[in-house]
Amino acid sequence: MRLWIDLAVDADQRDAHDDLFSIAAAHPGVQIVGISVFGDSSTAPDCAQRALARCGIADVFVYAGTPDPRALETAEGLLSVGPLTNLAKLAKFGVDLPPLVVMEATFSADPAGAAVVLNVASDLLAVPVEVSRRSLVAAELLGLFALVGEKVVVGKRHLGVALNGHMMMEDTAGEGLVDHDVVVECDHEALAQRVESLMALHIEQ
């Protein structure tokens, strides 16, 4: 999978995404093709570039803010682990987003943006807070494995976003709710073992 990652980073999060980049680099089915960063445009891209370099990943372009839609055309999957502000801007302009995984835990940073993405995205998988809280690995790693379809069980739910950023999730249709895939369960122990093995592989490389 040619993967695009949309994330948030600032100067105080120097090591925040090292594990995510390392696991993506070691996973045989994943190739990072681009990154877009939400945060201080004067420092956030450099923080992301340094994290990539620490993980031995080169030749990946990092966008400050909303990425060029033409760059996203190369992506086969999109992992969002930050506020959905960047993706909401693209969606408002009619950009067809790649298959997308979003984390409910990030919705509160931009509830309006999250609502736009849920309403517009045609291929979206949401990771609820209750699932990520039970995870034995970082939430963003759970999101990565959900995107590639490993160790998770997916079901259909009707989703919406409350004003406080809480994800509304119902089994039946309702006003303002949109039908999407949701991670309903995860084999947390198997996922942790998979992450451990890929981290070891990355170190060997």
Image (cartoon, rainbow, N blue to C red):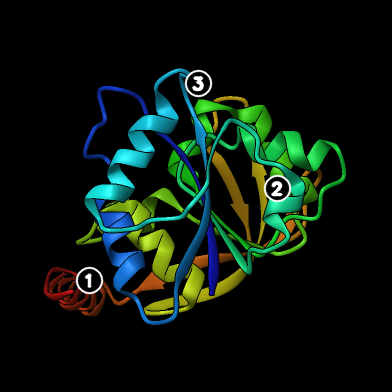
Spatial CA span between label 1 and label 3: 31 Å
Q: Position of residue 142 (x, y in %)?
A: 36, 62
Q: Name the front one of labels 2 and 3.
A: 3
The mark that comes first in sequence, 1 or 2, is 2
Going by the numbered disc 1, the residue's amino acid type is: Val
Q: Is residue 122 left or right of residue 161?
A: right
What residue is shown at x 63% (from left), y 56% (from top)?
170
Give percent across and percent down for residue 165: 55, 31
Determine the secondary structure under disc 1: helix
In this picture, residue 180 sits left or right of residue 167:
right
User: Where residue 67 sits: x, y (%)?
Assistant: 65, 40
* Res 26 quadrant in image: bottom left
In this rendering, the answer to whether 29 lies above or below 117 is below
> Which numbered dot is residue 195?
1
Marks 2 and 3, the one that precedes in the sequence? 3
Which residue appears at 71% of the width and 42% of the height? Answer: 68
Q: Which residue is mark 2?
A: 118
Mark 1 / mark 3, whichever is N-terminal? 3
Q: Nearer the viewer, residue 183 or 31?
A: 31
**Residue drawn at point x = 46 percent, y = 69 percent:** 31
